[in-house]
Each structure stands twice: as structure tokens, then as C-alpha cells.
Image (cartoon, grey):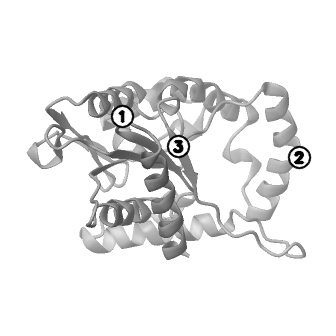
Amino acid sequence: MMSAALNVSANFIRDKLASRSVKPLVVGLQGPQGSGKSFLSSLLREELGRTPEPLRVVVLSIDDLYLPHSALKSLADQNPHNPLLKGRGQPGTHDVQLGISLLSALREGHSQVPLPSFDKSLFDGEGDRLPMDDERIVVVDPPAVDAIILEGWCVGFRPIPLDELDRRWDHTWQRERELLGIPDSLCTKLNIQELNESLSLYKPLWDMFDIFIQLKPSQPPSESNESPYSIVYRWRLEQEHYMKSLNGNRGMTDEAVRR
């Protein structure tokens, strides 16, 4: 599956670059948590960098735009009624302006562009942004950057009208909550509405994309009583376990991942 996604995505990017005179090409890459977005992005950087016509690709993750730990704590304290803002992950927990500034600097060809990095293992899995250092500096000119990939689970998400949110809450999301065993106490429709409103802040960042690539999980058989999103939790849990196996078991508990 990943090899097919790699070939399709790499050819798509090459074709788009060949048809335009302005570089870099800004690529939005979206997929559910644990679906392999980061892995695909690294493969794309490697594949597109091969001879005979190597391309210079910069990969950014929406995760590296998370607010610093202190700001995440302040956000949670300011919104005690919304459990979805207790920690990183949801719309509203990113430094959108930082993302806009990074893409603008890379696109305009500044000589050095420091890239942020967020360590999810710090503060018992709550995470914190690391200080920028020389290891994450991209020297843009020379050589010029050909493509920039911004990947993340909510990349490209835009707010929906309130009547559509009401309809989904009462029908589609109600069914998914039942299939996934999500208790009604997890959050309210007002909590979701607040996140929906936060998505309007991301529109200037998404508007910088030239092309968009989306990864989707396979749909279960129509006769199955399984949610298509059930695989996402398993993917996300595997992702957390793998990170903890590499860093001395620092990270989120299984229950924290589920929440």
C-alpha cells in the first residue's frame, strides 16, 4: 500500500513541478493519525532526491507547530469546560502564524530558515517544543528548494457551517460514537463547535498549498458493523508504543492515547 502511495504521490509532485516555472511547490499531505504520513513524507523526500534529476524537498509536520508546553497548559486552563483542549492535538493547539512564516520564508528564499521540532515524549507525553538549533536549519539558496511538504492529521481541514455540524453530530457522529464505544461524556457539541471555529484561523496556512494529497483508510465491508475509524486508534497506539520503545518508555499511556 505504501509503495503505491509513494509512486502515485511522487509522480503527482513531479508532474506539477514540470508544469510550473515558480518554485517551490507547496504540498499539503493529510491522513488519519498513525496512517504513515510522516513515513510517506520521508520516502518522498528520498525518492524525489534521486538522480538523474534530484529535487530538494523540505518536510514539515503540523506536530512541530504545536504551541510550547507552557502555552498548551495556559490554553487548557483558559478552557476548562472543553476537555478536547486539554493537551496537544486538536485545532487551536498549533502556532499557525509560525507555520505561515516558515512556508513564506522557504518560498521566498531566505538564506537560512530554522525549523521547529516538538518532542512528544516530554512532560509525560504532553510534549514541548524544542529550542531551534543548527541541526534543523535549511539553507535555501543555494540550492533552491523545489518542494515543501506539510503533513498532519488535520492539514487542510476547514470549518463547516453550523447546520452541517448539527446534522453530523446528530447522525453520522452519533453512529460513529456508538460503533467506537465513545461515551457521550467525552465532549459536547459545543466543544466540537469551538474547534470548528478554530479552524478558520488555519485557512491562510492551507491557502498556501499548491497541491493536496490525502491518505484514507480502507473502508470495512458494507455488511460490517465496524467503524472505518476503528483502525485509527490501533495505528495511533502502535505509533506511541514505537516511540516509547526508542526513548526509554517516555510518552503517553494507552488510556491517554484513546482520549
Left or right side of 96 for 201: right
Q: Secondary structure at mark 3?
A: strand
Residue 242: percent from left, percent from top: 37, 72
Q: Nearer the viewer, residue 21 or 12?
A: 21
Q: State the residue lying farthest toward the left.
A: 134
C-alpha span from label 1 to label 3: 26 Å
The quadrant of the rendering that contains the C terminus is bottom right
The quadrant of the rendering that contains the N terminus is bottom right
Seen at 54% across and 73% down, the residue is 4
C-alpha span from label 2 to label 1: 33 Å
Q: Nearer the N terminus, badge 2 or badge 3?
A: 2
Q: Nearer the viewer, residue 63 or 8?
A: 8
Seen at 81% across and 41% down, the residue is 169
Q: Nearer the viewer, residue 158 or 144?
A: 144
Q: Is label 2 in contact with label 1 (beta carbons under 8 Å)?
A: no
Residue 67: image tag:
1
Seen at 75% across and 69% down, the residue is 219
Q: Amino acid at mark 1?
A: Leu
Q: Amino acid at mark 2?
A: His
Residue 198, located in which quarter of the rendered image?
top right
Looking at the image, residue 102 lies above or below residue 173 = above
Q: Nearer the viewer, residue 164 or 242?
A: 164
Residue 238: percent from left, percent from top: 47, 72
* Circle 2 residues within 10 Å: few <14, some 14–19, many ≥20: few
Q: Nearer the viewer, mark 1 or mark 3?
A: 3
Residue 23, located in which quarter of the rendered image?
top left
Q: Which residue is mark 2?
A: 171
Residue 144: percent from left, percent from top: 22, 41
Q: Which residue is mark 3?
A: 211
